[in-house]
Image: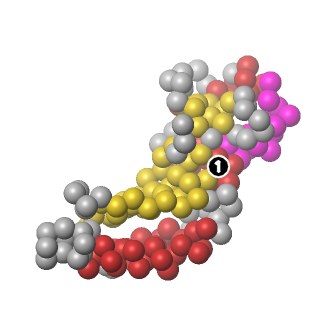
Amino acid sequence: GNWRSSTCFVKIKQEAMKIAALIVLLGTAEAFNAAVRPSFTRGSAIHAEIGETGVAFENVAREWRCKYSPGSSGGPGDSASLKGCQAVLDEFLPKLKELPGAKVTRQVCGGCLDFKVSIVQPLEEHGAWADADYEPLESEFMEKLKAVEGTSLHETQEITFEVL
C-alpha cells in the first residue's frame, strides 16, 4: 500500500522535517519511487525499506561511470583513458568530499574496463543533493569524463549503499 497513509507514517509525525527530506528524495529518486517506505528503528538517522523485501538502507549513492579503453598491452596498466578518468576524479575529489556526509569511493575493473565513482551520503543529505539534480558537480564531472579520449558508455545511477 501507500506508505504515506501507513500506521508507521502516522506514528512518526513528530519527525516531520526528516520525513520531508525523505519525501523529497523519494520524489526524485526514480530507482525507489513509491516502493520505498520510511522506517525509524535505529537511532535518529533516517532509514527506508524497499517495500516488504527486508532490504533496508540509510545511505544512498550517486554513481558516475564509464568504460575506459585498454592500453597497448591490452590491459589497464598503460591505459591513457584510465589515466584520464583518474585525472578528472582527482580534480573533483575535494569538491565531492565537501558534500554533506559524503564518502567517495572509486571502483576500477581491469577485466571489463569499468571506471566508477560512488558518492555515498545518508538519506537526508542525499535528498537535498538529489533535489538539486546533483548540480553543479554531476554535469561538470560527466562532461569532463566524456571528453576523455577512449571512454564510452557514460552513465549515472542512484543506488542504495550499505555496509552490512
The percent coordinates of residue 28 (x first, y second) are: 56, 49
Q: Residue sitting at 80 percent across and 24 percent down?
A: 11
The percent coordinates of residue 131 (x first, y second) are: 62, 56
- Magenta span has 21? yes
Number of residues whose C-alpha sits closer than 10 Å to that of mark 1, classed few (under 14), some (14–19) or many (20 or more): many
Q: Picture quarter containing residue 104?
A: bottom right
Q: Picture quarter containing residue 95?
A: bottom right
User: According to the image, label 1 marks what residue?
Assistant: 122
- Magenta span has 61? no
Q: Is residue 10 left or right of residue 70?
A: right
Q: Residue sitting at 80 percent across and 44 percent down?
A: 17
Callout 1: helix, strand or loop?
Answer: strand
Q: Please state which amino acid type lies under the numbered disc 1.
A: Pro
Q: Residue sitting at 78 percent across and 39 percent down?
A: 44
The percent coordinates of residue 113 (x first, y second) are: 25, 61
Q: Is residue 131 above or below residue 35?
A: below
> Which region shows up in magenta?
11-24
**The C terminus lies in quadrant:** top right
The percent coordinates of residue 142 (x first, y second) are: 42, 70
Residue 92 visible to the viewer = yes
